[in-house]
Structure formats: C-alpha cells, structure tokens
C-alpha cells in the first residue's frame, strides 16, 4: 500500500518560536532602556480577573504537525502491453478479484506460441543427445578402463619376470665367482702347508747331514750307519725336490685361478649389463602398451565428457526456454488487472490504446482500500520526540478545518527506520488511528497532533495563577456577591498552566486569577 506524502511542518513551529524569542528580547531591551533613561517611571500593578471553576482534563503532551493519509494502493499490470479495455471508472466501488482492465492479448499469445515452439525443439534435441550416444560413450570408456587394468597387470607380470631373470643370471655368475674364490683360498692354504713342509724337510736334511759328519769322524767308522744316513739324506733330498715341484705347481694353479676370477668378474659385469638391458626393454615395451591403452581411455573420456557437456548445455537451453515459456504464459495471465482488495477506484491514469510498462513511474490506477474508511494521521517525528512515542500511546488531533476540535486516537505504528527531511534532520514515520471520529476526515487534511504522556481526566481545574501561598497555606480568592473571600484549597496534578483542585472549590464557583504579574 502507498500513502500520500505528508507536508512535513515540524520545523515551522521551531521557526515561529525563534521569531517570538527575538521579538521578546527586543521588547525587553527597549523596556529596560526606558527604565534606565528615566522615561519609564511608573510600576505596573497586578491585574486579576474572575475565572469560573470547571471540570476538565489535565494533560502533559508534546505536539507536532500531522496530515491525514488515506490507505491507497497503486494498481499496475505485472507485464507490458497496450490497454485494450478499462472496465471501471473513478469512483466505482469494487470487490477483491473484480476485473479492472485488460491488455491486448494477441501479441502475448504470439509470444507463447513462439516460446512453445522453441521449447519443443530444445526438448527434442535434448532427447537425441541423451539417448544411445551417451550409453555408447560410457561403454567405450568402461571398456578402455578394463583394458587398462589388464594391461597394467600384464606390465607388472612382465617386469617382475624380467627382474627375476636378471636376479637369477646374476646369482649364477656370482655363485661361479664364489667357487673360484673358494678354490683360490684352498690352493693358497695348500701352498702354505707345502712351504711349511719344505722348511721342515730342510731342517731334517740339515740334521741328517750333521749326524753323517759325526759318524764319519768316528774311528773306527761305522760304514753301515754311514750308509744308512746317506740313504736317509738321499730320501730327504728327494722329498725336498718333490715338495718344491708341488709348491711350483700350486703357485701356478693359484695364478690360473686368479685369472679365472678376473674373467668371472668381467662376466658378471657383462651379465648385469645384458640382463638390465633386457629388463629395461621389457619395461619400455610394456609401458608403451600401457600408454597406448591410457591414451585410448583418455580419448574415450574426452569424447564422453564432450557428449555430457552437450547434454548439459542442451538441458540448460531446455530450462531457459521453459522459463521463457512460463514467463510468456504468466504475462498472458497478467494481462488482466484484478482488484487486490475491496475499495473505491480513486484514480485512473491511462486510456484504451495507451501502452503500459513494468517500470512506469505513474501507476495505472489507485484504489482506496475499504478496510480503512477513515484515513490515518501521519506524522514525521524528530529524534527527541520519537523516543517518547510508543505503540497504542494516546493521541489527540486538532485539524485546522475544524478550528482545533480534538479527535481522539492512538499510535498504531512507529517506524524504526529514519527518514532524512529537507533540513537534513532524522525523522521517524508515525501512523495514528483515529477513534470513531464523528466528522468527515479526508486525505491530506492538516492538523496539530498532541502525544499525551500523562493525563488526569474529569477533575476540577483552575489556572495555576489563581493559587497562592498565605501563612504557609495554599489559598485562592473566591468571588462572591458580597465580597471576595480567601479560601484554603488542596491542589493536585498540574501541567504548569492549570492545577487540579482536590478539595476547597465547587464546580461553577469563580476565583480571581492573575492576568498580568507585577
């Protein structure tokens, strides 16, 4: 619902007060100037007048300006088009759902037909993409994935076998080398033993020679013993000669074994190189096979992904065209403007044949809602006033048209959001419901709004200037037919202008009130 913009007169009162203050200051300056210059020599005497005692309400309130604001709703078509028919006139009473106006439906129907055709075509394209093609692409991808798994298994088996062959060949060569080294070690041990035997034989020979010399020096010479020693010496020399030959043969055998070891070590190096080449060749061959299958799988996946991409793009196109179709269908429904509520047509701004748009600034029509036959009063309160206002707070509104007659009301809404007025002040919208006004209140009527902060109803009141103190007692001067009387009274609540009299006076009596204080 939109409301008529109120005239914000909050600051008129402030400007008026400033003018009054300036005038008073000028007057006071002139007054004291007269006194100081000797031109004002007389002292004014207080003036009293009789005031009738009556019953009234005493209230404390703050005031601001307000404006009556009817509950008016702007009516617009939800789509654009040319006005074909207007079924109501300004002032017509309508019910919710009544047709108010209609746009030309021919172009809107054409838009529906075109949107339907586009939608049907994209649906057919989508079905074609999502049919056998996707299943075929998926099957190719799955087949290549299975082939890759198999090829990886073959790769692992072949590489493992090649590595095992390498290890077996190297092991065989290394075992042969170990045998040669063991043979060399045995020969070296034999050589050491032979040399030790040769040393022992030489020592034995030396001993036999010494014994022979001793025998030959004995007289008479024991020829038999000499012959025996000579035979023993011959045997040792023969043994030494044989042992030397064995040593020579063993040393020659050791040299041969050393040559064999070097040759075997060379064979091992050659075997390692040869067998490693075989392993590398197997790895390269099997890796190439795996790479080939991986390439086939990648190609199949790309083709499958492209197909899915086409499917998704086609689906997006279907959804987009469906949205266009639904929009066109909704536009056709929106070509008829219905009354959103019961009310009265307050304004029509277009005629048959004119074009309306969704972003137009001027509403097609305005409807005054019958839910609110009496306009609310709208106020824009300043910060200091807004903090004192609350929902359901009592309010009195005095419209200018009715010479300040009070209309009772209560606060229905206080906006928590500030509005910046033309003087850059923060103001807050306040909406006031009037309570059963007995006179016609029209949209736009201006008046003064009083927000009641405290009220004492239906009590005896007199001006506060009629009350004074005498001998510590509160008294008033009562006007009678014979002579004025001083009477003690009990006072109550006051707003600073009038005061409540709880006892001491009756309604209808008269008291003297100060008019011009001395």
Image (cartoon, rainbow, N blue to C red):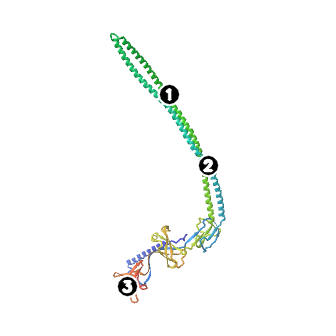
Q: Residue 137 carries which label?
A: 2
Regarding residue 102, the answer to whether it shows in the image is yes
Residue 279 in the figure: left or right of residue 243: right
Pick out the residue farthest to the bottom.
482
Q: Where does the N terminus fall, quadrant-wise?
A: bottom right
Q: Which mark is residue 487?
A: 3
Mark 3 surroundings: few (<14), some (14-19) or many (≥20) residues within 10 A: some
In primary-sequence order, the first of circles 1 and 2 is: 2
Q: Are marks 3 and 1 in contact (CB under 8 Å)?
A: no
Pick out the residue farthest to the left.
219
> Disc 3 vs disc 1: which is toward the camera?
1
Return the residue at label 1: 263
Per the model, the C-alpha gap separating discs 1 and 2 is 61 Å
Mark 2 surroundings: few (<14), some (14-19) or many (≥20) residues within 10 A: many
Indicate the secondary structure of the residue bearing disc 1.
helix
In primary-sequence order, the first of circles 2 and 3 is: 2
């Amino acid at each position: 619902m939109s409301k008529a913009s109120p005239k914000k007169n909050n600051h008129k009162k402030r400007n008026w007060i400033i003018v009054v203050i300036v005038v008073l200051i000028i007057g006071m300056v002139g007054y004291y100037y007269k006194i100081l210059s000797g031109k004002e020599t007389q002292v004014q005497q207080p003036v009293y007048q009789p005031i009738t005692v009556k019953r009234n309400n005493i209230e404390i309130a703050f005031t601001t300006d307000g404006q009556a604001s009817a509950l008016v709703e702007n009516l617009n078509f939800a789509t654009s088009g040319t006005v074909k028919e207007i079924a109501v006139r300004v002032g017509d009473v309508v019910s919710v759902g009544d047709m108010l106006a209609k746009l030309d439906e021919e172009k809107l129907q054409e838009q529906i037909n075109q949107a339907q055709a586009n939608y049907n075509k994209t649906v057919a394209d989508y079905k074609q993409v999502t049919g056998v093609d996707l299943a075929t692409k998926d099957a190719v991808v799955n087949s290549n994935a299975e082939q890759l798994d198999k090829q990886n298994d073959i790769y692992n088996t072949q590489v493992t076998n090649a590595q095992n062959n390498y290890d077996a060949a190297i092991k065989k060569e290394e075992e042969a080398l170990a045998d040669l080294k063991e043979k060399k070690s045995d020969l070296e041990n034999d050589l050491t033993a032979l040399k030790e035997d040769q040393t022992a034989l030489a020592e034995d020979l030396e001993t036999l020679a010494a014994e022979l010399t001793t025998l030959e020096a004995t007289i008479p010479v024991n020829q038999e013993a000499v012959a025996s020693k000579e035979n023993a010496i011959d045997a040792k020399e023969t043994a030494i000669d044989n042992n030397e030959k064995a040593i020579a043969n063993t040393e020659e055998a050791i040299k041969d074994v050393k040559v064999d070891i070097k040759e075997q070590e060379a064979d091992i190096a050659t075997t390692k190189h040869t067998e490693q080449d075989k392993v590398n060749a197997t790895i390269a061959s099997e890796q190439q096979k795996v790479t080939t299958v991986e390439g086939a799988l990648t190609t199949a996946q790309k083709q499958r992904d492209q197909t899915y991409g086409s499917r998704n793009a086609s689906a997006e196109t279907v959804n987009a065209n469906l949205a266009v179709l639904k929009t066109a269908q909704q536009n056709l429904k929106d070509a008829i403007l219905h009354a959103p509520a019961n009310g009265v047509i307050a304004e029509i701004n277009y005629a048959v044949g004119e074009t309306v748009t969704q972003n137009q600034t001027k509403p097609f029509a305005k409807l005054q809602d019958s839910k609110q036959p009496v306009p609310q009063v709208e106020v824009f309160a300043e910060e200091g006033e807004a903090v004192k206002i609350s929902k359901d707070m009592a309010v009195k509104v005095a419209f200018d048209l009715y010479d300040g007659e009070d209309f009772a009301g209560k606060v229905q809404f206080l906006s928590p959001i500030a509005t910046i007025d033309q003087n850059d002040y923060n103001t807050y919208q306040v909406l006031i419901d009037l309570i059963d006004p007995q006179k016609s209140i029209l949209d736009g009527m201006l008046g003064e709004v009083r927000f009641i902060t405290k009220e004492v109803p239906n009590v005896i009141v007199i001006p506060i200037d009629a009350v004074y103190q005498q001998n510590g007692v509160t008294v008033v001067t009562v006007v009678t037919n014979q002579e004025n009387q001083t009477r003690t009274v009990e006072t109550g609540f006051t707003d600073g202008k009038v005061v409540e009299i709880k006892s001491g006076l009756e309604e209808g009596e008269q008291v003297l009130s100060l008019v011009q204080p001395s």
